[in-house]
């Protein structure tokens, strides 16, 4: 199933990357306004085969930036494929135009376990009905979501990705072809730090991948660095 998912990601989801920049917020077209928010997946259907591929994950659109992270639903969980993206979005010919700086594919059953790409662009049609969002890619790939929140909070540009703290959730996408750390879940403020209640988490190097779907990770954030309890630190790029 992951191979099918990888093809779908390559065709339709390669757009889901974060060229997170300090550029001006996206122009306020209807499609851009409709996409704004934090959304949880309810459907991913491949364009060519029409196959539905169950997964758990989120996508966030806010102020011209987006992040995405998801892991396939299946057993054994440790062997499931994952994807994460970080990038910019704005008005496009079909609805919104997405520019991917990071496109991350993870497969614990393969060598290399990590597939990393940059710089892809995609046009996506957007339909919103209340708290339901549908994205249709040029390949025919369909993604559907339900809204978790309006994306109240902030997205921080990292040296190799982005961190979002919105609506009581965190979304983290960071790394390159040498190694990545991705995940999302609930975030509870504790002093100058956070307790990250993981919903889905996947990290990888070319040699190995690790999936998590539970547990609490402690982190500290001073506005300059986001540091996990194990010492891994992600530096924030200052705004211009």
Image: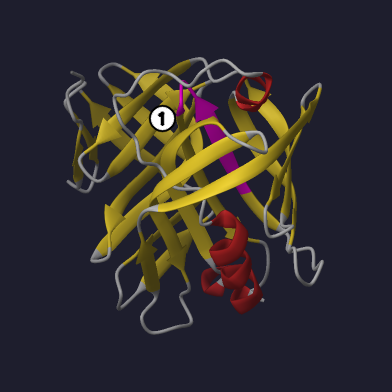
Residue at point 42%, 25% (across, down): 165
Name the residue furthest front: 93
Q: Is residue 132 above or below residue 230?
A: above
- Quadrant position of the N terminus in the picture: bottom right
Residue at point 63%, 37% (across, down): 93
Q: Which residues are magenta?
A: 57-64
Coloring basis for residues: secondary structure
Q: In the image, 199: left or right of 210?
A: right
Judging depth in this view, the residue of 80 and 23 nearest the camera is: 23
Q: In the image, 10: left or right of 205?
A: right
Q: Secondary structure at mark 1?
A: strand
- Quadrant position of the C terminus in the picture: top left
Q: Is residue 25 above or below residue 226?
A: above
Name the residue furthest bottom: 111
Q: Is residue 83 above or below residue 153?
A: below
**Magenta stretch holds residue 127:** no
């Amino acid at each position: 199933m992951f191979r099918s998912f990888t093809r779908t990601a390559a065709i339709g989801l390669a757009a889901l990357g974060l060229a997170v920049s300090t550029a001006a917020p996206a122009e306020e077209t209807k499609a851009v306004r409709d996409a704004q928010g934090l959304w949880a997946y309810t459907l991913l259907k491949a364009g060519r085969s029409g196959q539905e591929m169950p997964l758990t994950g989120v996508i966030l659109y806010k102020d011209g930036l987006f992040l995405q992270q998801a892991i396939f639903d299946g057993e054994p969980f440790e062997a499931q494929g994952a994807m994460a993206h970080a990038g910019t979005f704005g008005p496009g010919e079909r609805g919104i135009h997405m520019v991917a700086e990071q496109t991350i594919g993870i497969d614990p059953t393969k060598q290399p376990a990590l597939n990393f790409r940059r710089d892809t662009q995609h046009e996506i049609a957007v339909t919103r009905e209340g708290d339901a969002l549908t994205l249709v890619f040029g390949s025919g790939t369909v993604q559907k979501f339900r809204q978790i929140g309006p994306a109240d909070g902030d997205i921080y540009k990292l040296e190799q990705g982005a961190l979002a703290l919105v609506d009581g959730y965190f979304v983290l996408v960071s790394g390159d072809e040498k190694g990545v750390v991705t995940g999302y879940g609930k975030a509870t403020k504790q002093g100058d730090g956070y307790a990250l209640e993981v919903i889905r988490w996947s990290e990888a190097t070319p040699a190995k991948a690790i999936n998590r779907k539970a547990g609490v990770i402690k982190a500290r954030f001073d506005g300059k660095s986001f540091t996990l309890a194990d010492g891994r630190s992600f530096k924030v790029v200052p705004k211009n």
